[in-house]
Image (spheres, rainbow, N blue to C red):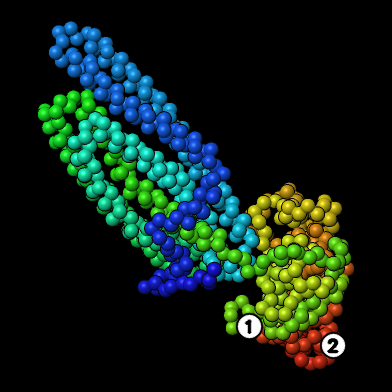
Amino acid sequence: MSEAKSEKEPGGALEIDRSELVATKVWDTSLFKRLLTYARPHRRLFLKSFAVLSLLFIGELLGTRIWKGAIDGPVAGAADAEDKAPFVQALLWWVGAYVALIAAMTVLRYFQTATLNKTGQAVVHDLRAAVFRHLQSLDLGFFDRRPTGALVTRVTTDIESLSEMFTSGIIALLFDSVKVLVVLGMLFAIDVDLALITMLTTPILIGISLAFRGGARRAHREVRARLARLNGYLQEVLGGIRVVQVFRREERVAARFNEALARYFEANRRTIFLFALFYPVMSLAVYLIQGAALWAGIGSIVGKGLTYGEFVQFWLLLNMLVRPIRELGERYNVLQSAFASAERIFQVLDTAPTVVPPATPAAVRTAPGQAPHIAFEDVCFSYVADTPVLRGISFEIPPGKTVAVVGATGAGKSTLVNLLLRYYDASSGRVAVDDVDLRELETSAFRARFGLVLQEDFLFAGSVEENLVMDRSEVSAASLAEAIDAAQARDLVNGLEGGLAAEVAERGATFSTGERQLLAIARALAAEPDVVVLDEATAAVDSATEHRIERATSRLLAGRSALVIAHRLSTIRGADEILVMARGEIRERGTHDELLAAEGLYAKLHALQYAAASA
């Protein structure tokens, strides 16, 4: 998939992702076939739905027959009879039969609603699970180019619209087609002339529906795109609410949200306008058809001997014919909304990850429990074409050794972590583990050997224990307890109400930055990793917390390979090798003492931090 592009809207409104405005044919057979692949496993539910709809249709037809029988039988007979009692009794039997039929159809309508909705939800369940699995398989580059809120919209709102497609869209449309053919046949059986008049006037309904469909498709695409942008901005604001409040941006943020909301409202207004125009025009056409049938029917009764009961049956059947045609616009609306959503969903499913697993993965040569040898060999990398982030990076992390990386912001330090964990692949060169290219290894098994701590680590809603274990079967109670002690987090855990069972708020909001870091370090160490990666793990903690982490550092990294991205130089004095980066290149390397003696970039950074600490 090409990169998403945004387009500035007039009036300074929020940009929308133009990839959200996907477009295909009015009826896309290939798209429909893809949707059917998710419906096929639930074919029994679809057959059950058709069976219920068939019984309801038969009931409706029986209802018209009961009306004809009652009118042409006891009602017509009582008109000329002196003794009306037998005819009244017969009429009561017809009424009883009709009441029983209505009761049965009421029960069937319950099963119709329940079965159709169950069918739609079953298909949606499988599709939503497939989209979520695929999203997890995509590389970080995809998420860098997509607002989170837009992706949430595709997994929730877009997929939910497909449920309606399978409940009141495709199934109903297919069955309505059958109903129209059967009812037409019955109309011709009752009176050919009346049926021909009906057939000559019904194309008016079809023409109105066809004229309506073009605008409906475009309107639904626009609504989906606006909703995705609205959700994306809402996600962004709520994620940065602290920044919004501290910089007093509430009014500006509200104004921008209202702009996006106004665009979404306007898109919905266009859709509403189409339907507000469509239904009255369609109703007018229906009344014209019914009027023509009434005028012709009176003539048939007078001139051709058409009975009153036959005409009432014809009238009821005519309504059964007109109803699905009149609802064609609504069915089409459902289909257009679903197709617009399906396009956007399959756009995600068709996005292939750029970081792909090897066809025949190799295993890390070093056994679990032993630190591997890691090497960056002439690595170059760019997030955006023609904008290099790393240039010719080469260094090694010998087994059990610690390599630290320092440098100014934007030097490319964190990119080394992204490449080492294979969130991205190098543009050229390679990252090797025990002399095997990362691209040849099974990614999930390789990552299981790592313990990662970020500068702003993420805690999930749930318990503390769930956040530390993370469903890893290799984490035992003993290794978890050891990790908590090693991370200097024992006092923190013991001080919580409930201990390890204590609840964690979303994103760990109830913990301080330092406390989140201590828990993140414990999480990284719980599975006893062979390689530890610390990406400025102490940059946001206070001096007391930093001291606690430093005291445990030798114990944390003992026997493990380690890559440490450092902001505070005081935390990496004991590293086996320190790399100094600037503008994507390694400018200096050596131990702490060697680099100070060289009086280069590292010495300047050290002097600046020492001066700042002494001030």
Q: Residue at x 40, y 50 (%)?
A: 334
- Mark-to-mark CA distance, 1 and 2: 29 Å
Element type where label 2 sits in the image: helix
Residue 315 picture quarter: top left
Q: Say whether residue 287 is visible.
A: no
Whole-percent x, y for residue 128 in the image: 56, 52
Q: Where is 122 relative to 188, above or below?
A: below
Q: Residue at x 49, y 60 (%)?
A: 344
Q: Say whether residue 10 is visible.
A: yes
Element type where label 1 sits in the image: strand
Whole-percent x, y for residue 101 in the image: 36, 23
- Label 1 amino acid? Pro
Q: Where is 188 relative to 492, above or below?
A: above
Q: Where is 575 relative to 346, above or below?
A: below
Quick one: quadrant of the N terminus?
Answer: bottom right
Q: Nearer the viewer, mark 1 or mark 2?
A: 1
Which of these two is toward me, 173 or 373?
A: 173
Q: Residue at x 65, y 81 (%)?
A: 389
**522 with respect to 409 (left or right):** right
Mark number, residue 388: 1
- Label 2 amino acid? Glu
**302 with respect to 136 (left or right):** left
Q: Are marks 1 and 2 in contact (CB under 8 Å)?
A: no
Which of these two is toward me, 575 or 171?
A: 171
Reading the image, the residue beneath label 2 is: 594
Whole-percent x, y for residue 451 in the image: 77, 64
